[in-house]
Amino acid sequence: IPVAYFLLNGLKASERAEITNNKRVLEFVAKSGVRVIALTFDGLSGNIAMCSDLGADIYNDKPYFTHPVDGHPIFVFLDAPHMLKLVRNTMGKHNLYDSDGQPIMFQYLQKLVKLQEERYFHLANKLNRKHVEWWKHKMSVKIAAQTYSTSSAMALEQLLADGHPEFTGCAATIKFCRMVNDVFDVLNSRSLCSNGFKKPLMPETAEVIFALFAEAIQYFSTLKVDVRSRTTGRIIRKLVIESQFKVGFCGFILDMSNLKNMYEQFVINGHLKYILSYKISQDHLEILFSCFRTMGGYNNNPNATQFAASYKKLLHHNEVKSSAAANCISLDNTSILTVAWGKKIKDFTECNEEDEETDDHQINVDDIPLKCINNTLNHAVLYVSGFVEIRVLNKIKCSECVRLLDECPEAESDFITRKSFGFLRFPRIDTCKVTWIVEKLVNIYLNNDKIKLKNAYQKIICDTMRNLDITALFKNFDNHVKDVDIIENHKYELIKLIIDYYLRTKMSYIGKCVTLRHQGLSVRHSLNKTILFKGQ
């Protein structure tokens, strides 16, 4: 609930501290019985100086100040999403080094994105061009969080294990990504039902989380960065927490220390059962500000008069918001002015003579050497094959087919073993044989620039069926096929479903990659004010 908003532009740190502490906010809410236990802000130097005037020393042993009325400690937190973006910005501009002198380089993530875009596959991560061009998306927390996610670390780890020459020496980068990801998960816990480090801080998770805090504080405190000396002009290596880039790393250290202090004061003493650290973040304020930005023609820089009017309007509309028991509610989700698609879509099982005549010859995957067939691509194929099997099992209605498919021998994959937390499916060997043929044909079409041809989707399916030895696949289905109607060949339908789902997934990803390549340069962030105030 918004309590107050002060226009602080031009105010000194001491004046901000006076507003926050003695004269304004804390005394005002204390009269209402509200107990303030934390103060959250981003890494602006003026805010940090304000905390010093309040009596806190966030870079040393006193990351709190006392309440002016009650006298209890108020813990200072630097907003974790902002700290994550600052850490990403530091790594994107400068190489970091761990305590052993091993480099932590953003270039490994750039190479991973380049490898995935060039070969049209991905190792189960969210990285794309937006993540490596981070300076165009400095304010996006989602981009920063996905950059240091566990999936990114696992992809680098798999390439390192495969001995990929471009990823030799990325072990320190992998450890850094995992450490930042785990710390941010703890500092951004939202639900009691989450898993891993996303669980709230409570007696059952305290030991594991505090062990992570001790390791992370030691790790961040020993990281080094190359900076240019202001006196000599030479490049020197110094601790990050003592450099000009210290705010993001010191902010993480501060948040971990104060979260532990809050646990000891409120959970151990029985005031709270658990702590959801997301409630201490600035996201609630950011959501409120996003409402302000939608007003006044989506102006993200209103003047004081415009802001006051928007503030009153939001409070008024929140007060008269309609409830589910109101007199007038939406009765259905009827869509208006919909148009049916009249064009006939060719079934993927059709392959008429006209299509066959357009081909110079039928493609045989065993006759054409492929550049993209390697161990790295094999991991991606096996991973997607497991996803395809899950889709197929949800699609087929025959319980006997489900049982027979589950009885087929599984394929081995160290990548799925590394990625799985008990929820991923290991594909069957025969399923992988089918998807491998599809993958080879897709790469053949890409290399020959035939992927843009008319009905390329149907042609790839037909070529796949020609190159498969169906009698050698899913042999345990043979007796089941004899028991059903001769027109309904469940084995044949299963193979067609596998081909269709895998090809659909592959073509969708190729389409996304091609779209990103053809998109023009994004000028929304670099020309923000020019766009907003054009014509004024």
Image (tube, rainbow, N blue to C red):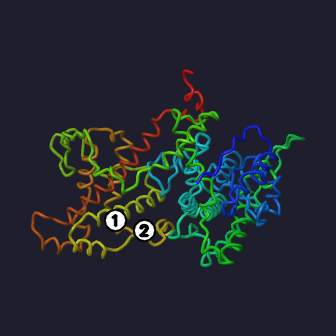
Q: How many marks?
A: 2
The quarter of the displayed image where residue 9 is located: top right
- Residue 469, which numbered label? none
Question: Which of the image's four quarters has the C terminus?
Answer: top right
Q: Which residue is mark 1?
A: 390
Mark 2 Cα within 10 Å, few/some/many (few <14, many 20+)?
some
Taking the image as drawn, is residue 403 in sight?
yes
The quarter of the displayed image where residue 531 is located: top right
Which SS class for mark 2? loop
Query: Considering depth in this image, is 390 or 70 the residue closer to the camera?
Result: 70
Residue with the most extreme top position: 535
Going by the numbered disc 2, the residue's amino acid type is Leu
Query: Considering depth in this image, is 110 or 374 the residue closer to the camera?
Result: 110
Residue at image point 26% right, 75% down:
403
Taking the image as drawn, is residue 249 in sight?
no
Residue at image point 19% right, 39% down:
343
Would you say 16 lies left or right of 158 here? right
Residue at image point 34% right, 69% down:
428
Contact (CB < 8 A) between labels 1 and 2?
no
Q: Which is nearer the N-term, disc 1 or disc 2?
A: 1
Query: Considering depth in this image, is 140 or 409 the residue closer to the camera?
Result: 140
Going by the numbered disc 1, the residue's amino acid type is Ile
Q: Which residue is mark 2?
A: 424
Residue with the most extreme right position: 231
> For the residues marked 1 and 2, what is the alpha-carbon distance in whole angstroms?
9 Å
